[in-house]
């Protein structure tokens, strides 16, 4: 079977291309996608639940990109095993044509093959289901780029999705989502969807090691997210199966070679981690693979750390004769206690997600996925099989739960808890009092009571 179609998207071709390569966007748009974990520049481990006629199945497999001619075309291949239902293989050729500076024609041609029980379904039924899945994907994809305005003529089952790259404060005035295209090559990517900002460290070739420029840029991104009222929760994660292997040691010779440079470098690291730590909104670090050194400080600067079973933590400052910064050390002490903190810093030992959970370094550990890929998909075993479930889905669920609650409650509680438990300065009691009064005087306080009386969900504005 072959399905062809197209959609015109009001965005520059580069923006559409970047979105076609962004794991957050793909996960959001693939119908029934439960998780999508990028494990290389061009491949993802995927779990997708699909109903074909009377058969509903959970497919586990891979999505890979090939024949890449950026930003014009690529081929997306998905192959998955749906248990007793059988298995499926889908190939989609996607091409982008520039119609105007801000208009792109996306055309696609998809072929699907079914095996096992699924192959016994009538071809008309299968064709209709495949056509509707393709249309749903590309409709959601367009909506993800263009924002809620484009929803008028799209299927309306989903809440509006907004996707954009680093939006500068002045673009907030327009009221329309701006997709300012952090390219796929950009070392930090940002997407905003449904009140959630997903910030992705994106240097998979060096396990997302942070360059000096990245520390500075990440600080700026978090400062801007703090001012953006549409963003309610921020998720910080890493591309390519790792969170962050710490500071980029390769550039130390040029940017952190002596005491003065080291001091300046630490100022940049602290400014970045403080921007995350002091963001007046909930933050979640979603951690797979390595989370080391400065990467651990980034994670500890978030309110929550949700990790995959394969996560590996450590602070190997002792291997480089570096004294870990004061603020990172304070957070480590608060999370794991003094003896554990000494153990981690003195020994530079790496520890896994189980220990991290037990010691209080992380607060959620995702269960491992069976890596069994028997049957006709046996050849998958030659590739790195996904051993750990992506914690992103759990993080998004938790974020959604927090987004329902009053922003002033969260920012007030965060201010108090951070200063009482995690920072050197201690609590500014007058500021705490001011925040308590601000919440009691707020429109949101009235809205919360009103909503309770009217038995409806409150709509909070943060003021
Ligand atoms: N800075 C710069 N480059 C780094 C890096 C870092 N912190 N961490 C990893 N890389 C690079 C490696 O140099 C390598 O580059 P190459 O392919 O050009 O040789 C690439 O990332 C892959 O890393 P590699 O060491 O080959 O992978 P591995 O799986 O064997 O080990 C680590 C991964 C993270 C355990 C190991 O790279 C490491 O110990 N990194 C340093 C971690 C650290 O000390 N961080 C604290 C810095 S203050």
Image: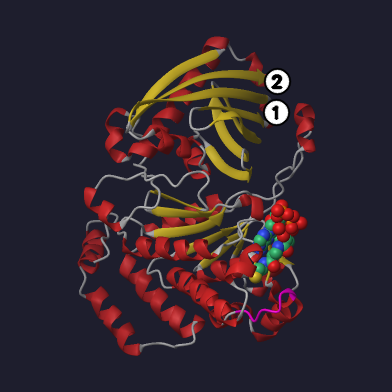
Residue 230 — which label? none
What's the residue at 49%, 87% (across, down)? 424
Residue 116 — which label? 2
The image shows residue 14 at horizontal and vertical percentages of: 43, 36
The local crowd at label 2, few if under 14, some if 14 to 19, many if 20 or more residues have their Cα within 10 Å, is some
Residue 84 — which label? 1
Q: Which residues are magenta?
A: 319-324
- Contact, mark 1 vs mark 2 (Cβ under 8 Å): yes
Image quarter (top left, top right, bottom left or bottom right) of the N terminus: top right
Dominant secondary structure (helix, strand or loop) of the stretch shown in magenta = loop
**Residue 291 visible in the current orientation:** no
Q: Quadrant of ligand 1?
A: bottom right
What's the residue at 77%, 40% (across, down)? 372
What's the residue at 53%, 80% (across, down)? 327
**Residue 92 visible in the current orientation:** yes
The image shows residue 48 at horizontal and vertical percentages of: 58, 36
Q: Say left or right for 46 vs 419.
A: right
- Count every numbered label the image shows and give the total: 2
């Amino acid at each position: 079977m072959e399905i062809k179609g197209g959609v015109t998207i009001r965005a520059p071709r580069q923006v559409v291309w970047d979105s076609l390569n962004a794991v957050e966007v793909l996960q959001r748009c693939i119908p029934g996608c439960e998780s999508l974990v990028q494990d290389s520049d061009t491949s993802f481990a995927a779990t997708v639940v699909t109903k074909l006629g009377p058969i509903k199945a959970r497919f586990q497999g891979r999505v890979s990109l090939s024949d890449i001619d950026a930003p014009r075309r690529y081929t997306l291949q998905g192959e998955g095993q749906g248990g007793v239902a059988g298995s499926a293989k889908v190939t989609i050729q996607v091409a982008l044509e520039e119609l105007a500076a801000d208009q792109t024609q996306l055309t696609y041609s998809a072929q699907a093959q079914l095996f096992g029980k699924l192959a016994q379904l009538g071809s008309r039924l299968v064709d209709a289901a495949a056509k509707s899945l393709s249309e749903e994907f590309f409709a959601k994809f367009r909506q993800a780029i263009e924002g809620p305005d484009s929803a008028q003529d799209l299927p309306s089952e989903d809440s509006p999705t907004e996707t954009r790259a680093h939006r500068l404060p002045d673009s907030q005035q327009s009221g329309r989502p701006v997709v300012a295209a952090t390219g796929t090559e950009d070392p930090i990517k940002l997407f905003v969807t449904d009140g959630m900002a997903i910030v992705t460290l994106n240097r998979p070739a060096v396990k997302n090691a942070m360059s000096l420029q990245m520390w500075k840029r990440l600080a700026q991104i978090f400062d801007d997210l703090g001012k953006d009222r549409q963003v309610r929760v921020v998720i910080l994660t890493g591309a390519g199966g790792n969170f962050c292997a710490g500071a980029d040691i390769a550039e130390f010779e040029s940017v952190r070679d002596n005491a003065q440079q080291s001091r300046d470098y630490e100022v940049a690291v602290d400014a970045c981690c403080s921007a995350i730590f002091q963001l007046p909104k909930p933050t979640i670090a979603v951690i797979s693979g390595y989370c080391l050194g400065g990467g651990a400080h980034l994670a500890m600067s978030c309110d929550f750390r949700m990790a995959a079973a394969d996560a590996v933590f450590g602070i190997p400052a002792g291997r480089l004769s570096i004294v870990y910064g004061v603020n990172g050390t304070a957070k480590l002490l608060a999370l794991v206690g003094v003896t554990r903190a000494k153990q981690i810093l003195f020994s530079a030992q790496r520890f896994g997600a189980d220990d991290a959970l037990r010691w209080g370094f992380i607060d959620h550990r995702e269960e491992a996925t069976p890596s069994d890929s028997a049957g006709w998909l046996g050849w998958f075993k030659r590739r790195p099989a996904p051993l750990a479930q992506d914690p992103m889905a759990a993080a998004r669920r938790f974020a959604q739960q927090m987004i329902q609650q009053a922003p002033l409650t969260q920012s007030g509680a965060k201010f108090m808890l951070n200063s009482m438990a995690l920072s050197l300065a201690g609590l500014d009691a007058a500021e705490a009092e001011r925040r308590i009064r601000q919440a009691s005087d707020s429109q949101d306080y009235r809205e919360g009571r009103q909503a309770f009386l009217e038995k409806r969900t409150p709509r909070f504005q943060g003021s």
